[in-house]
Amino acid sequence: MQNTEIARALGEVADLLEISAGNPFKVRAYRNAARTVADHPDPIAELVAGGEFDLTELPGIGGGIAKEITALVQTGSMPQRQQLVATVPPGLLDLLRIPGLGPKRVKLFHDQLKVNSVADLKDALEKGKIAKLGGFGPKLLEKIREGVAGADTGPQRIVLHEAEQYARAIVEYLKAGGGIDAIDVAGSFRRRKETIGDLDIVVSCVNAPDVIARFGKFGDVTQVASQGDTRSTVRLSSGLQVDLRVVEPSCFGAAMQYFTGSQAHNIELRKIAQGKKLKLNEYGVFRGSKCISGRTEEAVYGALDLDWIPPEMRENRGEIPLAKEHKLPKLVTLEEMRGDLQMHTDASDGKATLPEMIEAARALGYGYVAITDHSPRTSMAGQTPAELRAQWKEIDRLNKGMRGLRVLKSVEMDILESGKLDLPDDVLAEADYVVATIHYGLKQSERQLTDRLLAAIDNPWVDAIGHPTGRIVPVRPSYPLDFDVVATAAAKAGCLLEINGSERMDLPDTLAAAAKSHGARFVLSTDAHNTRELRFMRFAVAVARRAWLTASDILNTRPLPDFLKGLRRGRNR
DNA sequence: GCCGTTTTCGGCCCGACTGTTTTCAGTCG
């Protein structure tokens, strides 16, 4: 059982409690516990099954919820949920996802009209029963009707890569209107999460109404969902929701802090403020009615006796105590990356030629790059050993006439379904760098897939495991793996784990953090298939920063001689 | 239901916008 499933069960208990008008603080307790479970790097179910682990050591989980989780893991059902479902039909949970409907209105429908599902609600709407309840005017009814119609198509999250394009367009548009003092994008976008539910834009300016009016007229806006004096929400033609918040310059830092979140991080911060007899909100830090800071984020954190915390760390996973003790790690930066260790040319499935890729990489200032075209198994795109050797000969020739940049002779080699490698050792030994990956047989069992990666790690000529979990955000989930076993084996063998900056964004940040705790080291790459994608290194860096990695965890932050010395093949020669 | 540098009892993050109202509840982030 995955952490997300446990978290969902806890969240459902919170929803059911809310509909049944239970203790609101008990509702919050379940939500806090759900968040703790969802954010936990290790599988809670396995920890519970192991018997050694005390759930109540986790924040927000006490004796009661620990029992509920244990029961869920052991029996597949949660007593508290069973009990609630006896009085609150679970079909009501679907109603909560309809915009404009919260627990109060859902309870009202249930109590007054015996509505137990979306279908029931649809029926009640058509028969005019909702309108007769009172408190539901024409606008609200229309909103609910729309929500019922779209109830089966849940809100989509978009990949960070795509979100950047929308963000840039809107920021440029607003800036072009003039009169803006500062503008930035906050929310999960700024925390660099791999997917974004909506965009949060914060502006400081002197004339808020102008900016808000201009925002609503952005070309791609199809609906202005709300518009007030200081904030506005619109929907773009893609369905993406964009929130704008306008504040005075003296509040910009506080607003950025507030809207960057995460919610769990902010709640923790406000509790710290309370403990100091202060109040924290989106306008600043207040002592009584007096604002003591708010212009910059540094000042806001400083007022709470905390070091400024990088947005990627703001998930309430232990960063706040570190900030208090001045012990935050120095996260890796894009500028520290010295090389790119996976890219393709038109010799396999890339779009650009070898010289074009090399020239584009040189323009980015790298000291070295690995050309990693595919091995034979990758049908249509694979290179035979003879073709690889011909490419490597060409690379040797190009390297001779080149200064500043060294091209590494490499290959992205498939780990076959059988667990065998797609190329013989004598070919691998001729390469400067080999990244092994799985592309086929993704439906195999956890045991089989884990064994395949272990077999690759076992080969001394495999320098790195590429996109280790096979996911593609958001379309394909990771294949099943015993990741702790893989990470431990990789750490022991000196085999690097790749963080892939394409839309795979693989490793996921939580697994990268877990792998670091096992002693693994990493390599960051773009997996570029054209020259434009060479700039995807920023996404690999985003994942690394969310995993709290520093330059010393990542081999390709080192200059070429140190990089080569750090490869396990350096020991094998 | 959880939690404790003021607490084992009595608290529990904070504010904007909408729609329906004439002062506010509900929703949302």
Image (cartoon, coloured by chain):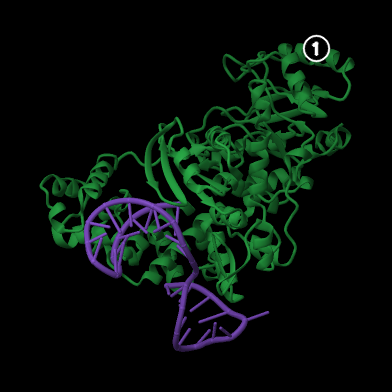
- Quarter where residue A392 is shown: top right
Residue on which the image places disc 1:
A394
- Count of numbered labels shown in the rendering: 1
Residue A451 horizontal/vertical position (percent): 60, 39
Residue A52 higher or lower than A491, as above or below: below
Q: Is residue A412 left or right of residue A128?
A: right
Element on which disc 1 rests: helix
Residue at the outermost left position: A127
Front residue of A110/A556: it is A110
- Colour assignment, chain A: green
Residue A317 higher or lower than A352, as above or below: below
Q: Is residue A460 left or right of residue A105?
A: right
- Colour assignment, chain B: purple
Residue A8 higher or lower than A395, as above or below: below
Q: Is residue A161 left or right of residue A465?
A: left
Residue A10 horizontal/vertical position (percent): 40, 60
Which quadrant is the C terminus of chain A positioned in?
A: top right
Q: Amino acid at mark 1?
A: Glu
The residue under the point 27% across, 62% down is A104
Circle 1 chain: A
Residue A31 visible in the snapshot? yes
Front residue of B28/A327: it is B28
Front residue of A196/A135: it is A135
The residue under the point 55% across, 35% down is A177
Q: Residues within 10 Å of mark 1 (few under 14, many from 20)?
A: few
Residue A314 horizontal/vertical position (percent): 60, 55
Residue A1 visible in the snapshot? no
The residue under the point 52% across, 29% down is A441
The residue under the point 68% across, 61% down is A299
Residue A199 horizontal/vertical position (percent): 50, 43
